Image (tube, grey):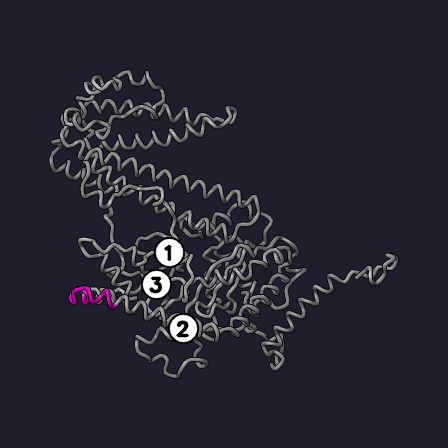
Amino acid sequence: LERLTDNTGTNVPKLRYQPLLRVGLQWRHLKMLKRAGRGHDDAGAAGTKYGELAIQCPSCPHPGINLPPDWKDVPEEKRFLYRLLVCMDANFRLKNQLVSNYSQDPGLGIGWAYMVGRKPYEDFVLSQANENDVSTCAAFLAMALALSRFCQGLRYTGVGGVFCGRGEMFMPNGVGNLQKGERYANMDYIFGSSLREIQLPSHVETIPLIPKFHEPAHHDKNHEQYSFNLAVGIGNSDGEVPERAWAGHNGLGNATKTQGPGSRHDVLDDHFGSWNWRKYCGMGNTLIRRYKAAIMERNRQVEAHRGFTASLPEELVREWEEMCTVWDEDKVPKMATNPYSVEGSGLTQAKVCEELRKEENREGGTHSPTSNSTGPVDFIQMGLELQTVQYKLRALAKEHTSTPKLLRGTSLKDQRQRLAQNIKGWEAIRAIYMPGLLQYQIQSASGGPNSWENDPNPEEVELFLPSQISAEHRKAVCVNGLPEIESRYREAQCHDALESLRRALRIKTRMIQFKNKNIRGQEQSTRSRALIDRVHRNALTSVDQYRHARSAKMKLCGPGIWEDTLRPLLNNDVRSYSDPRRNTRGTGRRGIWEDGHHPQQMPVDNEDGTGEASHHGRGRC
């Protein structure tokens, strides 16, 4: 434009870029006031209240507007029609740098639409400032990112939002800036601000649920009460509204990151209003499309459930139906019997140790050949702990060899010294409970008392636990009952290793989801990848521990019924959760079995029938 005005460069026109930006902000603000009808109010723009410029969801219940006069008196089975479904989540892509300030860039209508009012919001957050005001979830990486050095130079680390769970629209005054991550103080205020005009009664019931795609990344224990698939009156809602809404606004991140606080506020309000308007206009087509898909899926699920129910005894079905009804009527946290949970063995090393100690005390130490204070249970437990330390020390030594000498510390040397002392102390007790070991070592040429001279590294010293003794010599080497004690410990080790593996895979899944959603830039991506790799190594460690414990169990007991539960763990079995229908095209929406309980994968051959009960209960939903 400058060249077209004056191609000689002698009379360059004055730069109008900044005035153009200010005109754009004013135009956005005036159009928002016009669309809300503020020109028809005698108070004008100055009389605008908090959230008054926001486009509200027509599918949300609004008493006196879209609800019948007798909506409070409807039967219990119809109340879900007037239930408000609210979803909340944070977005760390919409950050803001320390550019300008509110004195120079105050904004034109802060709090009038979708963003919360600044002053009362920030005063509340400051009054609740607490370093412990974070989630205790191990996979909640939002806190780790917010407390990292990547927050330096930022005024806001992102935004938190509250949405209508059915219409997928931003709630009025339902978005707030996050000063230091997704803290309870921030999200609680934003949630309360979005519901301010609804005037909820004091006895209102709140039902917490976890979105379907995120639910598998959480712990399994007693989490059925938070599943969208098992909640009454939810239908096929998945709770992932924030993910879809944020995906449509992540592109604003680079544009608003360097804006002043007031300008950024007005720009976000304008884009959130555009999102709500497009959702409002497209709601007719969306509802008819989802209605047709829901009818088809409903018919298929009802027929499948009817066929499965017909194959079961009527008394059993009646009992399960009563369990489901009682569980549905119970309030969160639910204390009623959970009909949707398939209980595992619950076997842990701590429980096994407690049981063995009780048996040892009951028998009066009959397994102990001497009056030694260390019983056989403690002896085996010490040996297994030493074996675990050996495994970790071997991994540390492997990393140590690849580290330059100048960067090597004394940690490995100190740990080796402590381990050597512990092993030698344990070997003194071993002579009591394994009196025939010396003769076995001489006959098998596996090293006797001079084994330390052959290999000075304690992590390579063989401990000669009962599982490491051949079956034909084990009875002559060990005192009575010692192999059985280790066998029970090994079974518990397998269960503990599997639980650790599941936990590591859940954390890894949540970390990958968080990285894909929020992390950009080489430095942040590299650090996030390093954290994910660390969790992956923990998962591989759990795999090795399970395989080693199962191998020891096999040597001690041989094949048996225990193999039905503790099966060989193949490499293909070690994988994170993935929706089996995610990569296929269908006529309906995803999420029928997205909490990981697909009916084809449910065990239906449990002796106590818990698998069938859970399958029947989920089909009922």
Q: Do the residues labelled 2 and 1 touch (CB within 8 Å)?
A: no
Q: How far apart are marks 3 and 1 (CA)?
A: 16 Å
| Residue 292: numbered disc | 2
Q: Distance between the residues labelled 3 and 2?
A: 19 Å
Residue shown at 48% from the left, 64% from the top: 162
Residue shown at 84% from the left, 59% from the top: 12
Name the residue carrying label 1: 580
Q: How many marks?
A: 3
Give the class, few, some or many, for how many residues have Cα within 10 Å of label 3's Cα (few <14, many ≥20): many
Q: Where is residue 81 in the image (x, y as percent from the top left)?
A: 37, 75
- Quarter residue 541 falls in: top left
Q: Where is residue 69 in the image (x, y as percent from the top left)?
A: 39, 84
Q: Main secondary structure of the magenta part?
A: helix
- In the rendered structure, which amino acid carries the disc numbered 1? Pro
Q: Position of residue 427 (x, y in %)?
A: 25, 23
Name the residue carrying label 3: 229
Q: Is residue 504 left or right of residue 249?
A: left
Q: Is residue 131 left or right of residue 441?
A: right
| Magenta span of residues | 306-318
- In the rendered structure, which amino acid carries the disc numbered 3? Asn
Q: Does the magenta stretch include residue 64?
A: no
- In the rendered structure, which amino acid carries the disc numbered 2? Lys
Image quadrant containing the N terminus: bottom right
Determine if residue 338 is in view. no
Q: Is residue 260 left or right of residue 66?
A: right
As displayed, is residue 16 above or below residue 219?
below
Q: Quick one: 347 or 356, which is closer to the camera?
A: 347
Mark nearer the N terminus (3 vs 2): 3
Residue shown at 46% from the left, 49% from the top: 512
Residue shown at 47% from the left, 55% from the top: 183
Secondary structure under the numbered disc 1 in the rendered image: loop
Closer to the eye: label 3 or 2: 2
